Image (cartoon, rainbow, N blue to C red):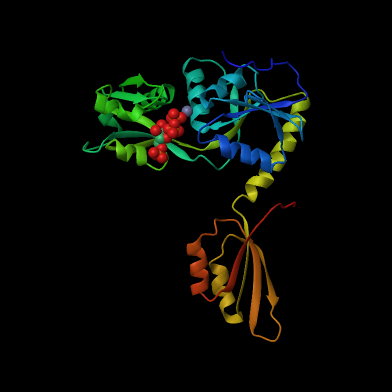
Amino acid sequence: MSPPVPAPVAARERLRIAIQKSGRLGEPSRALLKSCGLEWRESRDRLFCYGESAPIDLLLVRDDDIPGLLADGVCDLGIVGRNVLAEQSAELSLSGRPQVAQEIRALGFGGCRLDIAVPEDWDWQGPGDLAGRRIATSYPQLVRQWLAAQGIEADVVFLSGSVEIAPRLGQADLICDLVSSGATLAANQLKPVQTLLHSESVLAGPVPPFTDMRAGLLQQLLRRMDGALRIKDSRLLMFQADRGQVDALLKLLPDAERPTLLQVDGEDSLALQAICHGAMTWQRLEDLRQAGARSLMVLPVERTLA
Ligand code: PRP
Ligand code: ZN
């Protein structure tokens, strides 16, 4: 028996956000919402979490269920892969029904591609190779929509999981599945040949948009989310360098926001500090050191307010 879910109400004064209960998107989704100042009381069944710091509650569900929960009004917002949202959207448009959910923000994590992949020894010439073939996938509507756009007729075999072993089991000739690192394909002697969709986590909401209190709550959440997303990879970079090397060093920092240069007393050297928005990898620090930076320091950025 599944635990009870609070019933939907037409006009709510609280926002209910569905996120993935377990799996790749669950933790980063929670982390993003936490960085927006949201906190929850965990319930015993861990399916529904009551928002304590704001009237925003969490519903922990299977990612594939999120578009349906949005459509039914059981939740107001969802954090879900664009691929899942696009599959629902393709299903609705292929059957001539109106859209019920839309992407509000791309969230920058959970990046992957929906790719056609074929056995490694296939001498791939292009999409025309797919005519009359059997394609195993968990995204049948997206694949059908794409095939139709290419003018290709092929059989789509729906599998809810373990798609990558379908060719070896003889269930299909090739697959269309999510690819992130590519390790799953390689382990199954498959190679990606065609991308149908670039995906990442998105914040999804209903069509049409809210007209009650939830509209204001969403605007506030988006302001905080935009701030949190802006500084996610940001670090405060500090170092010293000789005056003559500063121009070359700044060229290595195209993502630096308004660098501040300070005179170091009694020496011909300057201290630089800047907020950098790209990942500050060890390799970047090595490059800066090579170009004359000394006493390099990278510090986290807790919060910014424009
Ligand atoms: C996806 C996909 C592949 C795997 C690809 O499954 O179906 O199996 O990830 O990732 P890789 O390129 O890094 O190897 P996921 O683990 O998300 O599970 P699910 O399909 O059951 O949701
Ligand atoms: Zn899934």
Residue 203 position within the rendered picture, expressed as x and y whole percent measured from the top left: 61, 33
Residue at the spot x=54%, y=22% of the render? 65
Residue extending farthest front: 44
Residue 114 visible in this rendered orientation of the protein: no
Question: Which quadrant holds residue 130?
Answer: top left
Q: Which residue occupies the foreground of this view, 293 or 103? A: 293
**Among all residues in the image, which is located at the extreme top?**
1
The residue sitting at 30% across, 38% down in the picture is 187
Residue 120 falls left or right of residue 68: left
> Where 213 falls versus 72 (above or below)?
below
Q: Write the residue at 55% across / 31% down.
A: 80
**What percent of the width, then of the height, locates residue 210?**
72, 25
Asked if residue 244 lies left or right of residue 219, the reply is left
State the residue in front, 112 or 44.
44
In which quadrant is the N terminus drawn? top right
Where, by quadrant of the figure, is residue 144 drawn?
top left
Q: In this view of the protein, can residue 271 be seen by the observer?
A: yes
Q: Position of residue 173 (x, y in %)?
A: 26, 26
Up-down relation of residue 220 to residue 147 (above or below): below
Number of residue marks: 0
Q: Position of residue 36 (x, y in %)?
A: 70, 41
The residue located at (56%, 43%) in the rendering is 108
Q: Nearer the viewer, residue 261 or 19?
A: 19
User: Quick check: 277 left or right of 168?
Assistant: right
Towards the viewer: 41 or 35: 41
Position of residue 12 relative to residue 293, above or below, is above
